[in-house]
């Protein structure tokens, strides 16, 4: 027999320094452009690891290496549970280790990023960092081009 | 006064709290003990605070063989020939308005007994010399809080405690950049006057604390429950610091914003960390317009944090734009760092009003300096970045 427990959130004070970020939509494109534009920045120094999706980038790295563009959501790795990343200003009301274990059971190996609903009615979202790799300039350029092409195709449809 | 304190701390890294605590202790007519390793700018911070208030300053490094005459002055030999034991105090501790005594616990019993009178009663007595000392605040420094009972009793005379550590890794570049500021003394700095500090002492002494006493008692109970015990004298005197915090912010009635000094009466570093954790909710609403860094350090509350971020970011935005591209890139990196600090510290729907305007300026400034990638993006194969993971619904 299993029991579902509601996943709740609370505000963390003070917020810890960030260990990663999530960028979606326009913020993701701006982020990619920013990373590519800085020839001596974190990208060039291979200080960032990440995963991507359609109009989505998730990047992890040292706080000082994380770039900024408007619209990012900064993540912190939960100190007691390194396999779990959540937005810096919140924590889960359920013990993080239980949450992380549940995520592994359902979604496979982590680490995982857990994003709370932005508005009422939304669901909590889970992103996997299991395949995170150092971000390469070439693949980021390719990703950006693909996203631009997809946007154009959408616009023409 | 806010400007004088800011300029006093300019160039020092992570020592703003110490400069502000000197002001707080001076208004409260209490003394400050700074605990930390050598070479962490303790004396420099105090020296600058003294200069900020144009106060007469006395500084001495105590040792095991330091004679009392080295800090209070030699016996006046002319008067001694006349049969009177009087001390020539010119330029010495009894005439100082702000004093710094390094390695205070190395002092002999004679030294500590001499200091007790000066600290407690603000009176220096030796032989036929009996004078009221103009001392507003004595700052003592030590590597550690003494375990010896007799020395601990002496240490208890220093109500305010500050614990300093070497500059952390992320700020090492800033420390090295600011080294020039530490060595030069020619940059103009705003100053206040000791009269301004003195003018606050009376409102602090007569401050109405009735609204916050229940909160103070509650905080003490919370600390006791967590194993942090404050002596009765320390609890009672903590009120003076709370009153001083209110007076520095121009109020004659203390309220919950002024509770943050409680953390600074906790006598040890470990207990201080416990206190910050235990009192986090109690101190969440505390802040100070005059002593922003000290309030933030004590409470880590959102209002105090927002205040410090807003001030630091505004200063960065108002800094002149360098011509050289390498320096511009450095400034750009610092602007991004400030934006990152703001966005990581607050949820978008919880951004305090005082930060919203600054953030918008920051966003516009960074956007204006944005550099686009050279050439068009290449069309490639439909393959994700290495390690592409898909978003999934929980």
Image (cartoon, rainbow, N blue to C red):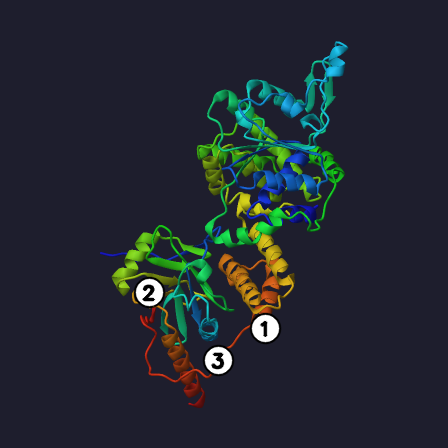
Marks 2 and 1 sit apart, C-alpha to C-alpha, by 33 Å
Name the residue nearer the viewer: A117 or B102: B102
Tell me the quarter of the image containing the N terminus of chain A.
Answer: bottom left
**Which of the numbered marks, if any, corresponds to residue B374?**
3
> Against B118, is B369 above or below?
below
Q: Using the image, name the chain to which the residue with label 1 belongs.
A: B
SS at mark 1 in the image: helix
**Regarding mark 2 in the picture, which secondary structure is present there?**
loop
**Percent x, y for residue A2?**
25, 57
Depth check, front residue: B139 or B243: B139
Query: Which quadrant holds residue B363?
Result: bottom right
Task: Tell me, yes or no, if residue B292 can be seen here.
Answer: no
Q: Residue furthest left?
A: A1
Identify the mark at residue B126; answer none if there is no mark.
none
**Mark 2 crowdedness (10 Å alpha carbons): few <14, some 14-19, many ≥20:** many
Which residue has dot 2 on it?
A129
Label 2: chain letter: A
Question: Can the viewer see residue B329 in this picture?
Answer: yes
Badge 2 and badge 3 both on one subunit: no
| Residue B221 position in % (x across, y down) | 50, 33
């Amino acid at each position: 027999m299993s029991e579902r427990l509601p996943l709740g959130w609370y505000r963390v004070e003070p917020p810890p320094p960030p260990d990663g970020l999530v960028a979606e939509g326009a913020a993701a494109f701006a982020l990619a452009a920013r990373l590519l534009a800085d020839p001596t920045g974190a990208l060039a120094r291979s200080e960032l690891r990440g995963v991507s999706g359609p109009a989505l980038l998730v990047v992890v790295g040292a706080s000082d290496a994380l770039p900024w563009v408007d619209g990012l959501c900064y993540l912190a790795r939960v100190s007691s549970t390194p396999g779990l990343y959540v937005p810096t200003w919140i924590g889960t009301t359920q013990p993080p280790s239980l949450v992380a274990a549940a995520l592994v059971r359902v979604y496979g190996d982590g680490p995982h990023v857990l994003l709370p609903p932005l508005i009422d009615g939304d669901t909590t979202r889970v992103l996997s960092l299991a395949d995170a790799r150092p971000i390469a300039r070439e693949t980021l350029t390719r990703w950006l081009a693909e996203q631009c092409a997809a946007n154009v195709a959408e616009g023409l449809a | 006064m806010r400007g004088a304190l800011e300029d006093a701390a300019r160039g020092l890294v992570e020592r703003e709290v110490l400069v502000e605590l000197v002001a707080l202790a001076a208004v409260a007519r209490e003394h400050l003990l700074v605990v930390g390793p050598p070479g962490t700018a303790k004396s420099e911070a105090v020296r600058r605070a003294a200069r900020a208030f144009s106060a007469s300053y006395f500084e001495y490094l105590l040792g095991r063989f330091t004679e009392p005459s080295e800090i209070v002055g030699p016996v006046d030999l002319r008067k001694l020939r006349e049969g009177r034991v009087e001390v020539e105090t010119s330029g010495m501790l009894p005439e100082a308005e702000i004093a710094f005594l390094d390695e205070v616990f190395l002092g002999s019993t004679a030294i500590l007994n001499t200091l007790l009178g000066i600290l407690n009663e603000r009176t220096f007595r030796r032989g036929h010399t009996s004078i009221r000392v103009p001392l507003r605040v004595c700052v003592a420094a030590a590597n550690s809080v003494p375990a010896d009972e007799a020395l601990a009793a002496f240490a208890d005379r220093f109500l305010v405690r500050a614990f300093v550590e070497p500059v952390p890794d992320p700020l090492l570049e800033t420390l090295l950049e600011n080294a020039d500021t530490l060595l030069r003394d020619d940059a103009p700095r705003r100053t206040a006057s000791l009269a301004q500090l003195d003018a606050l002492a009376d409102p602090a002494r007569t401050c109405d604390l009735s609204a916050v006493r229940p909160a103070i008692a509650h905080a003490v109970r919370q600390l006791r429950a967590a194993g942090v015990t404050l002596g009765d004298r320390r609890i009672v005197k903590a009120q003076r610091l709370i009153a001083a915090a209110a007076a520095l912010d121009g109020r004659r009635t203390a309220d919950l914003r002024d509770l943050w000094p409680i953390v600074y009466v906790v006598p040890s570093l470990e207990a201080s960390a416990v206190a910050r954790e235990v009192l986090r909710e109690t101190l969440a609403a505390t802040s100070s317009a005059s002593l922003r860094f000290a309030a933030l350090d004590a409470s880590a509350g959102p209002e105090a944090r927002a205040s410090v971020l807003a001030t630091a970011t505004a200063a960065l935005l108002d800094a002149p734009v360098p011509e050289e591209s390498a320096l511009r890139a450095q400034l750009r990196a610092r602007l991004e760092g400030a934006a990152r600090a703001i966005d990581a510290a607050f949820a978008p729907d919880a951004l305090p009003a005082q930060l919203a305007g600054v953030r918008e300026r920051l966003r516009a400034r960074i956007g204006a300096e944005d550099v686009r990638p050279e050439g068009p993006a290449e069309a490639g194969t439909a393959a994700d970045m290495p390690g592409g993971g898909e978003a999934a619904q929980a």
